[in-house]
Image (tube, grey):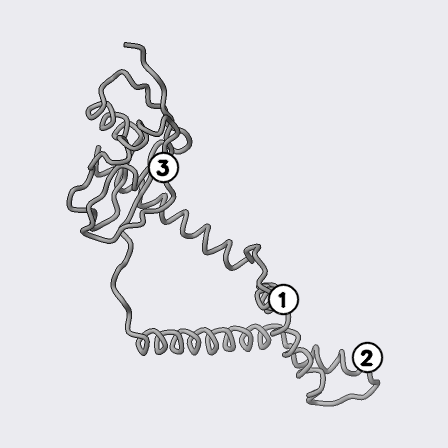
């Protein structure tokens, strides 16, 4: 019998919750005939679902397909040779608890950043710098150039907002900002770490 080829790649995320029966089609995307795709997608792989992050390799996928459909089909992976999947969280969080945690986090960030800025200004003697700058602009020597200090404080807030593209978000900007990119990079590094950890357990 003449063999034929099918290609697959891992999906980026797992869409089922803990305990839901998982088929091969929940983890991979195929390119083949419609009949072959349906057969492969319906292959059961975790009858009781997954309850924790699991690592699947291309070798495991190919072996499973060959066991179910025979060796007359050539399976070739595209992209990553392994992927990490974790079940979707189905638990609903208490809205009050979420609000309290957000407020608590905001207070910590506010006071932490305020202290960091004050300590930095104390180290570099920002008061004297403002006095000199105010004297160069107005020609008057004052001990507390409030007007310049207020403008400087507003400028810090505006600079942070511009850097993190706060105003662009109000315009429904689709491109990610620096914060989203950092969070995405951190998530990728976490996924790579977990994948390596799961791979180490199998060896």
Q: Is residue 160 visible?
A: no
Cα separation, mark 3 vs mark 2, equals 63 Å
What residue is pinned by disc 2? Answer: 136
The location of residue 184, given as percent across then percent down, is 46, 52
Q: Which mark is residue 162?
A: 1
Q: Nearer the viewer, residue 81 or 33?
A: 33
Q: Quadrant of residue 131?
A: bottom right
Give the mark count: 3
Of the residues tagged 1 and 2, which is closer to the observer? 1
> Mark 1 or mark 3, which is nearer the start of the sequence?
3
Q: Is residue 100 above or below residue 56?
A: below
Element on which disc 1 rests: helix
- Neighbourhood count class around disc 1 (C-alpha, 10 Å): few under 14, some 14–19, many 20 upward: few
Give me the residue at 71% from left, 82% from top: 148
The location of residue 64, given as percent across then percent down, is 22, 28
The location of residue 33, given as percent across then percent down, is 36, 26
Cα separation, mark 3 vs mark 1, equals 37 Å
Q: Which mark is residue 33?
A: none
């Amino acid at each position: 019998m003449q063999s034929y080829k099918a290609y697959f790649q891992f999906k980026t995320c797992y869409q089922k919750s803990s305990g839901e029966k998982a088929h091969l089609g929940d983890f991979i995307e195929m390119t083949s005939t419609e009949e072959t795709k349906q057969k492969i997608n319906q292959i059961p792989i975790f009858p009781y679902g997954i309850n924790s992050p699991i690592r699947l390799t291309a070798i495991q996928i190919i072996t499973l397909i060959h066991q179910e459909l025979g060796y007359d089909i050539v399976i070739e992976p595209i992209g990553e040779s392994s992927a990490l999947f974790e079940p979707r969280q189905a638990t609903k969080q208490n809205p009050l608890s979420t609000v309290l945690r957000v407020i608590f986090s905001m207070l910590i960030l506010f006071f932490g950043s305020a202290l960091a800025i004050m300590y930095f200004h104390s180290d570099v003697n920002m008061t004297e710098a403002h006095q000199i700058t105010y004297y160069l602009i107005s020609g008057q020597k004052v001990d507390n150039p409030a007007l310049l200090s207020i403008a400087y404080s507003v400028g810090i807030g505006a600079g942070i907002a511009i850097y993190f593209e706060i105003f662009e978000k109000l315009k429904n900007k689709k491109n990610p900002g620096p914060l989203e990119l950092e969070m995405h990079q951190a998530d990728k590094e976490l996924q790579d770490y977990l994948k390596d950890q799961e791979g180490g357990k199998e060896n």
